[in-house]
Image (cartoon, rainbow, N blue to C red):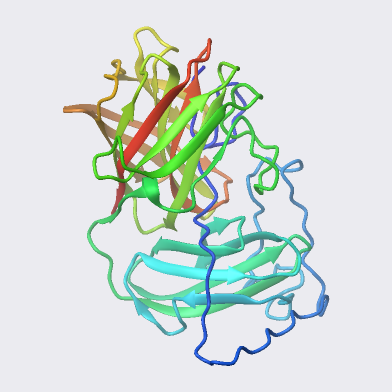
Amino acid sequence: MQAVPFVVRSSWVSKTIFLTSLSLVLASCGTNSKMAAAPDQPSYPSTPPVPINWSPSTSSLPAPPACMPAESTCTPPYPNGSNDFPLTVSNPTDGASVASPMNVVASATPKNPIFFMRVYVDQLAVYFTFTNSINTQLFVAPGQHTVEVMAEDKQGYISSTILNVTVTSQPSQVTISGIQNMPGWQSCGADFPPGSGRDGQVCASGNPNPPTSSMTQNVSSPSMDGQSAQFSMSGPNGYSNELYFNAIAGGNNVSHFTYDLYFYIDNPAAPQALEFDTNQTFGGYRWVWGSECNFKGETPPMWDVWDDASGIWRESSVPCNPFPANTWVHLVWQFERVNNQVHYISLQVGDQTYNVDTYYNNQPDWTLEEIDNAFQMDLAQPPVPYHVWLDKVNLTAW
């Protein structure tokens, strides 16, 4: 069975690539030697909550198209609407001058369970998470901007903080390095697990009985730099899959991406496919660059790329030659966002570079804003255990 990117799809080979977010819990400290009592949470309700009409079982979208608090279409309208729980934005501060990518750190502490948090830049949604904290990098064009961080709990209460920020500059290229060891990685099998925010929706697809799979970070051997990540796959059921994903950034001020990594596999005859993906989502649209080395779905094996608007894999002209066992293989994808299309530019495997030069339409009507990377393991039939190590996983954006 083929693997697919981190997206909700209708076919039996569908998967999802994309996303929840980096969730680093914000810590606080004080200078007083005598600890002060924490203030009580505000009492609900001081104003009515915003009605919640979205759930994974009632909508095909992966997240609610929540109204922006600055708009009068909210119920109730801001600034007179719900603002009933603490929301702290520790970075950036109001009036700050920062470089892009801009680090945004925030946390919300509602009495009720959190529903989601979202970041807007000049009223454009650029980052989303189902967690109650944010620590991410946002690509924002130089200039003056209004940044809004908002949070909603599962009862419909909303808090929002609005900041005025000046972005002074952005380098010609920005590289996010060592992604394999960054916090925020999550995983799912055929469906999203309970409590994920998207519980019950299709994730990695395949056999509904999940495999036995795990991720271990900061592995010293095998490793190129002493800090690889090990991914393991086994189980009694063939055609079962596990997706690992990390929403590492957000924003709309970058449109070119280089996904550069090394991988090492102990049993190259075992997997059905190995999948490597990058995604960008903002303003209600998603651009998916999904790729898989399809070992057993085609003869001869080929690299497939994902056509998100059609919801199917497309065979490329790049051969997927068997990888040597216990050897580091260099993989480099060049991607580009061109208006409402994704552009697969080229693929480098080892010392061989292939011109792909293929365009597909993006997917409209998608929320859950982010820039993320993902890696997926597929178990063949009959199932044979195997391990993959990733190292020096970098994403360069400009």
Please provide percent x and percent y for residue 12: 60, 21
The residue at 64%/59% (across/down) is 116
The quarter of the picture where residue 358 lies is: top left
Task: Classify residue 273 as left or right of residue 198.
Answer: left
Q: In this view, does 192 lie above or below 74?
A: above
The residue at 28%/66% (across/down) is 170
Task: Classify residue 252 as left or right of residue 66.
Answer: left
User: Does the image show residue 143?
Assistant: yes
Looking at this view, name the residue that lies furthest to the top: 299
Quadrant containing the C terminus is: bottom left
Please provide percent x and percent y for residue 252: 41, 57
Q: In this view, does 279 lie above or below 203?
A: below
Looking at this view, name the residue that lies furthest to the left: 351
Q: Which of 106 and 57 lies nearest the eye of the viewer?
A: 106
The residue at 48%/69% (across/down) is 105
Q: In this view, does 332 lie above or below 234?
A: below
Q: Which of 306 and 319 lies nearest the eye of the viewer?
A: 319
User: Does the image show residue 122?
Assistant: no
Please provide percent x and percent y for residue 97: 35, 80
Task: Classify residue 267 as left or right of residue 206.
Answer: left
Please provide percent x and percent y for residue 68: 62, 66
The residue at 43%/85% (across/down) is 95
